[in-house]
Image (cartoon, rainbow, N blue to C red):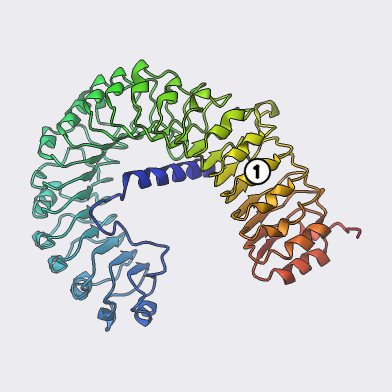
Amino acid sequence: MHSFFNKCFFCLHTWIFILTGLLYSTAQIPEVPYYNDSTFYRVDLALKNPEKCRYLFLEQDSLSELPAGFTRLALLKGITFRYCLNVNWEQVISQLSRMPNLHYLEISICNLKFLPGNIGDLSKLEALNLKSNLLVNLPVSIGSCNNLQYLNLSFNRNLDLTTVTESMQLLPSLSALDLSNNLMSEFPVNLSNLQHLEKLNLADNILKNLSDELKNFPTLQSLDLSNNPTLNFQEELSKLALLISLKHLSMTNNNLRTLPESLGNLTTLESLDLSGNKLISLPKSIEKLVQLKELNLGMDKDGINRNKIRNFPAGFDKLVNIEVLNLSGDSILVLPSALAKFSNLRVLDASWCTLFEISEALRGLKQLEILRLGHNHISKIPVWIGELTALKELHLEADFFTYPVDKISMVPPAIGNLEKLEVLILSDQVVRALPTTINNCTQLRELDLRNNLLFSLPDSLVTLDKLQKLDLKANDLEKLPAGFERLSALKHLDLSFNEPLNMVTASGQLQHMKQLEVLDISFNKLNPQIYYELKRALPHTMIVAKGFNNLVPIER
């Protein structure tokens, strides 16, 4: 079950990330990209490819210092040391100081107790990540890192915050600071010199109150107070109005049941994350947050903590600038009618709710690109779905154990009007046939029809030349459409658990699909000849054929 939650949240957060810009807007490299052609994971291989290496990611490496000739990596922008416990940090930093383009340094989970004084030699450093160590303080020499914009000190629970914040005052360019997971009970003081601070992360602490010193942060745009259940938000929330530039506020997982009317004082907010709480209502004053573009009232990433808002305040329809709205896991029975006025809405997540229909309030949302309504009790796709012509993703998966009466049995031909549709998820429903108009969804790259009642597919399906993933597991297919091999972009195909499928004919078609990366034909009517013919024809395809030991002879 958690995989569904995680996928849902991953996709939504990806969209939020895109809409709000880079997480640390001024730091060039917020972290070393793990999957990148220019990222290397061994120093020796990097030294053999100095013209390609831009990033080094060293994890559980036993090195004590960097090898001779390391300066040949003149194009190196970022380096990560993770679980590297034998490093002579003073020596390594001395070596790194000779790297002309180094902007990012991460030393995480390395049992680091003291940051060497020569850290100041990294004068071009823009981002320093020291999370999950045993640091007590920072050397005064860090003030020589004049270009440092991002500093991560999360999970350093031995920090002497008074000393540390004094050292940080020497970093006038600092724009993003992460002090999460440090058992902080008091708001950090002595940060008033950080005149360019834009992002402050205080999540996962034990804060008791906020500080009137907030007025000294005129540039602070983003504040994360998630998972601080000891903080009295009823009394302290009003202090956030001192942050005259605040745009992004996160208060997730704080066991909040209500919010004070002072929330309405935060009129500069563009993003508000209240997910993973226990809210039963929203304050009327939320109508004043007319700059809001993102509002997250969804469940937490594990699907455990959920809000229980049934009714939205009358002024909710004034939030007409909202682009991303997450209501996932809430106990709503009907989507709020106010959505009809959210003409800028691009992403709506109302999955894992208690919805029984697709509300007509969505009908006029011409900008809607992602619609998540999975894991509800919806039994019908309205004909007007074809009016949502900006849709790129439509998620309508059901639950396996839901009663059939609460499942979708028919896909209307109007689905073909969604010419921009890229993802269509209809798994665990009771769909018996797809409309022939599906071929009009020319941008479709993922189609999930797992666990339905399909006995055939329309011939028009084979014209979807951008389709990359097709899941037909657990249906009643008897054959594949003529010309199925024309799906030249298809990489992942699941045909497992289709017992009626004529595998002799299907195999003849599949053998021409050389581009397939994964083919699942498990628990079908296979025989050794079919299987090995496919293996020979598709040598680069991973063919999954579970149940191979129970082959049933097939008559030709």
Q: Is residue 451 rendered to the left or right of residue 342?
A: right
Q: Is residue 169 rendered to the left or right of residue 326?
A: left
Work out which quarter of the rendered image holds the C terminus and state it. Answer: bottom right
Q: Quadrant of residue 540?
A: bottom right
Q: Residue at x 13, y 39 (%)?
A: 218
Residue 527 position within the rendered picture, expressed as x and y whole percent measured from the top left: 83, 62
Point out the residue furthest to the right here: 555
Query: Looking at the picture, which amino acid does disc 1 mark?
Result: Ile
Image height check: is 61 above or below 405?
below
Image height check: is 136 above or below 245?
below
Seen from the viewer's position, the closer of residues 29 and 120 is 29
How many labels sit on residues? Answer: 1
Q: Quadrant of residue 261?
A: top left
Residue 375 seen anywhere in this rendered image of the structure: no
Residue 179 position within the rendered picture, expressed as x and y whole percent measured from the top left: 23, 47
| Tag 1 residue | 438
Residue 337 position within the rendered picture, expressed as x and y whole percent measured from the top left: 45, 20
Work out which quarter of the rendered image holds the N terminus and state it. Answer: top right
Which element is circle 1 on? helix
Seen from the viewer's position, the closer of residues 369 and 529 is 369
